[in-house]
Amino acid sequence: MPDSRGAEPPDTTDLARLRSAASGCQGCPLYQDATQTVFGEGAAGAKVLVVGEQPGDKEDVAGEPFVGPAGKLLDRAFEEAGFDRGSLYVTNAVKHFKFKREGKRRIHQKPGRTEVVACRPWLLAELRAVRPDLVLLLGATAAQSLLGPKFRLTQHRGEPVEPPAELSELVPSAVATVHPSAVLRAPDRDEAYAAFVADVKAAGKLLG
Ligand code: URA
């Protein structure tokens, strides 16, 4: 029976080596049903590292993060907030798609704390490789993966947040906001989108 003993990344800051090692990760049972590991994308020197929750249906098939509807919204928001795509490294807290089948559909399931903790070594390895100036956390799963389970997004969205002491070198500054999927589901989507862009802009100001 596979367990959740956790990811064991190689000791390297070479993103290509990390990606290749992650493709065979069996650190938790999610690898069994997902199509593939979806590792982060972007340059090693990216100034901003963006963390989502987990790949969705489209990302699982494409093998790339944020290529579905949430990704399109994210691209638009980054453009509006004045971020250059080349300055971003985009990844997820959990690197396999967790879903349940309903007929032919695969329905997204929120990853549990065990899966988030099991996958966290990959996120830390990406942080060590990229060394961003700013980490933008999208949604509670991403925020709690780095900042701990007590972090409350509703209380701190859009503000600079203090990373735990052991991460202060890897995470010089961080901002958490809602996940783009929450914007897509919001009753007033325009209002939710405007608030999301405002958070992304506020995060950008920390870059100086
Ligand atoms: N949602 C996420 O959190 N990440 C993706 O890559 C796609 C959708």
Image: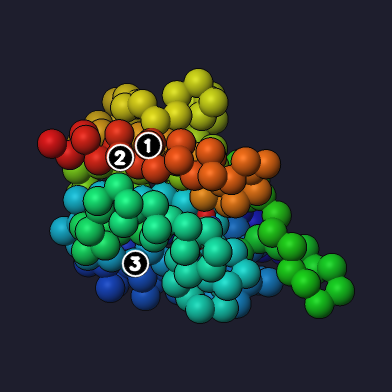
- Graded by Cα atoms within 10 Å as few (under 14), some (14 to 19) or many (20 or more), the crowding at tag 2 reads some
Secondary structure at numbered mark 3: strand
Q: Residues within 10 Å of mark 1 (few under 14, many from 20)?
A: some
Residue name at image x 45 percent, y 72 percent = 64
What is the three-letter code of the residue carrying label 1? Ala
Residue 41: numbered disc: 3
Instruction: Give me the C-alpha separation between circle 1 and circle 3.
Output: 24 Å
Image location (x, y in percent) of residue 80? 32, 52
Q: Where residue 58 sits: x, y (%)?
A: 58, 72
Tag 1 residue: 198
Quadrant containing the C terminus is: top left
Location of residue 17 in the rendering, given as x and y in whole percent from the top left corner: 29, 72
* Res 26 seen here: no
C-alpha span from label 2 to label 1: 5 Å
> Is 181 displayed left or right of 120 in the figure?
right
Looking at the image, which is closer to me, 57 or 203?
203
In the rendered structure, are the residues bearing label 1 and label 3 in contact, judged by CB atoms less than 8 Å apart?
Answer: no
Within-10-Å neighbours for mark 3: few <14, some 14–19, many 20+: some
Location of residue 157 (image quadrant): top left
| Residue underneath mark 2 | 201
Mark closer to the observer (2, 3) = 2
Q: Earlier in the sequence, mark 2 or mark 3?
A: 3
For badge 2, the amino acid type reads Lys
